[in-house]
Image (cartoon, rainbow, N blue to C red):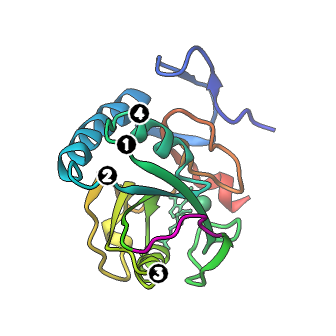
């Protein structure tokens, strides 16, 4: 069995990749943090009058929620939702199930959904209409990654970390069959891992 990641030092420092599970590191920890600092400042200015409720989509957005919120100075609130549109494979099923619902009442709230990645957009488009139907005043999206070539529906996304091509990526919350979420960087998964 191959090692998942890397020879670890402290988070944020360079890691020596020894694994053949990845073809390349797409975004380093430092690149992700720099982008989140920019987005955090933008959120501070956009929502100054009405601090939003951050809705993190489990499990992929855990890292993004933690790091993004540390870059926001407004008195925001936090809630979590878990939905499923993927099995353990790499293709969207288009079928969305709520695995864990919100605790917050959305009536009249400004909601900011925080996602790990927008692929086909099917999950987000379902989530958008679901949260709007609960009476939120506004529902906007922040995603770390977006794959424009994979879009099957058009979604208005307020904050995008990075646009990427159609490669399957892991790390920084993103998994393949629940593995690799703990990587502090985002890497392209080698095809041999999911064709095995
Ligand atoms: P859709 O297609 O509905 O899918 O926009 C969004 C969800 O699919 C997962 N996803 C990925 N997960 N690497 C991953 O680890 C990827 O490259 C990838 N592309 C899509 C993810 O759970 C996301 O929330
Ligand atoms: Mg996933």
For mark 2, what is the residue? 51
- Could you tell me which quadrant the C terminus lies in? bottom right
**Visible in this render: residue 173?**
yes
- Of circles 4 and 1, the one toward us is 1
For mark 1, what is the residue? 75
Q: Is residue 67 above or below residue 177?
A: above
For mark 3, what is the residue? 134
36 displayed left or right of 53: left
In terms of secondary structure, where does tag 1 sit? Answer: loop
Task: Give the spatial CA distance, label 1 vs label 2.
Answer: 6 Å
Residue 188 spot, x, y in % from top left? 50, 47
Task: Give the spatial CA distance, label 4 vs label 1.
Answer: 11 Å
Task: Give the spatial CA distance, label 1 vs label 3.
Answer: 22 Å
193 displayed left or right of 12: right
Q: Residues within 10 Å of mark 2 (few under 14, many from 20)?
A: many
- Residue drawn at point x = 75 percent, y = 36 percent: 2
Is 105 part of what is drawn in magenta? yes
Task: Give the spatial CA distance, label 4 vs label 3.
Answer: 28 Å
Question: Which badge, 1 or 2, comes first in the chain's sequence?
Answer: 2
Residue 93 spot, x, y in % from top left? 60, 81
């Amino acid at each position: 069995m191959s090692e998942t990641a890397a020879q670890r030092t402290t988070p944020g420092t360079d890691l020596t990749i020894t694994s053949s599970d990845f073809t390349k590191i797409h975004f380093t920890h430092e690149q992700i943090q720099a982008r989140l600092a920019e987005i955090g400042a933008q959120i501070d200015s956009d929502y100054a009058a009405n601090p939003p409720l951050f809705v993190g989509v489990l499990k992929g957005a855990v890292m993004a929620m933690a790091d993004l919120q540390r870059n926001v100075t407004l008195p925001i609130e936090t809630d979590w939702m878990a939905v499923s549109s993927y099995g353990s494979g790499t293709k969207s099923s288009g079928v969305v199930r709520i695995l864990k619902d919100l605790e917050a009442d959305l009536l009249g709230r400004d909601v900011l959904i925080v996602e790990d990645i927008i692929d086909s957009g099917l999950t987000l488009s379902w989530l958008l209409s679901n949260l709007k139907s609960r009476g939120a005043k506004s529902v906007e999206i922040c995603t770390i990654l977006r794959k424009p070539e994979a879009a099957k529906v058009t979604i208005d996304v307020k904050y995008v970390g990075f646009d990427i091509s159609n490669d399957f990526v892991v790390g920084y919350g993103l998994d393949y069959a629940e593995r690799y979420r703990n990587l502090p960087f985002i890497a392209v998964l080698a095809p041999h891992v999911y064709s095995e």
